[in-house]
Image: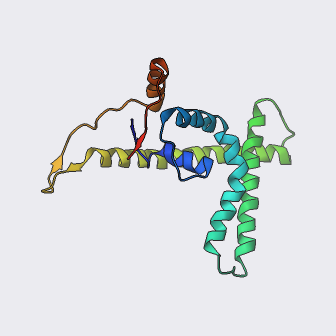
């Protein structure tokens, strides 16, 4: 079975398990993927401050300027506030707060943030998907002419695992 080492699932696997070594057979890889997809949201939420601080520390390895630490702290506090407001906005479905109270303002700010995040994500996600689709269709031969051919279809990891379980074998993975 051939899998792409640069696929999003493989990159996420390496990030989640903090490893550079990929499994050579499908069976352990499949079950680790299942566990990863189950726990990815809480793991990401718990490791978000670490990822942010790791990103910040990569830039200031040789020391920090006077305003870098307070600026990064302000960004972390703002992100915490925005995330709390977004989660607090969900309470609008079952709680009603007094008019112009802090709680009602948090709900409204959270709803506004959900709209902004959804819109920006849809815009950039759609733009990225269209560009990726365009790039995947363009192929060139050795003379520089475009070649328009369909990519070879390959079964997914789940289909291959089901086939392997049925036939009682564990296929080898070739990472490309």
Q: Does residue 100 appear in the picture of this structure?
A: no
Question: Which residue occupies the foreground of this view, 2 or 86?
Answer: 2
Q: With 36 as the anchor, is 133 left or right in this view? A: left
Q: Position of residue 80 (x, y in %)?
A: 75, 54
Q: Position of residue 56 (x, y in %)?
A: 65, 68
Q: Quadrant of the N terminus?
A: top left
Q: With 157 as the anchor, is 94 left or right in this view? A: right
Q: With 110 as the anchor, is 131 left or right in this view? A: left
| Residue at the image point whose x is 55% and y is 49% from the top | 14
Q: Does residue 121 appear in the picture of this structure?
A: yes
Q: Position of residue 84 (x, y in %)?
A: 76, 48
| Residue at the image point whose x is 47% and y is 29% from the top | 170
Q: How many marks?
A: 0
Q: Against 40, is 20 above or below?
A: below
Q: Quadrant of residue 65?
A: bottom right
Question: Which residue occupies the foreground of this view, 38 or 65?
Answer: 38
| Residue at the image point whose x is 21% and y is 39% from the top | 149
Query: Which residue is situated farthest in the front direction here?
Result: 169
| Residue at the image point whose x is 48% and y is 37% from the top | 25
Question: Which residue occupies the foreground of this view, 56 or 12?
Answer: 12
């Amino acid at each position: 079975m051939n899998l792409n080492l640069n696929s999003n699932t493989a990159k996420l696997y390496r990030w989640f398990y903090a490893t550079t070594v990929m499994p050579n057979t499908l069976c352990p890889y499949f079950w680790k993927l299942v566990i990863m997809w189950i726990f990815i949201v809480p793991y990401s939420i718990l490791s978000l401050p670490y990822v942010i601080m790791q990103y910040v520390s990569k830039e200031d390895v040789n020391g920090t300027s006077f305003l870098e630490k307070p600026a990064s702290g302000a960004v972390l506090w703002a992100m915490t506030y925005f995330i709390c407001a977004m989660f607090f906005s969900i309470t609008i479905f079952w709680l009603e707060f007094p008019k112009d109270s802090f709680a009602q303002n948090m709900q409204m700010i959270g709803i506004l943030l959900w709209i902004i995040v959804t819109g920006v994500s849809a815009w950039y996600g759609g733009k990225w998907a269209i560009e990726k689709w365009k790039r995947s269709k363009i192929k060139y031969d050795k003379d520089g002419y475009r070649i328009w051919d369909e990519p070879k279809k390959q079964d997914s990891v789940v289909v291959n695992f089901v086939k392997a379980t049925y036939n009682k074998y564990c296929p080898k993975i070739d990472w490309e």
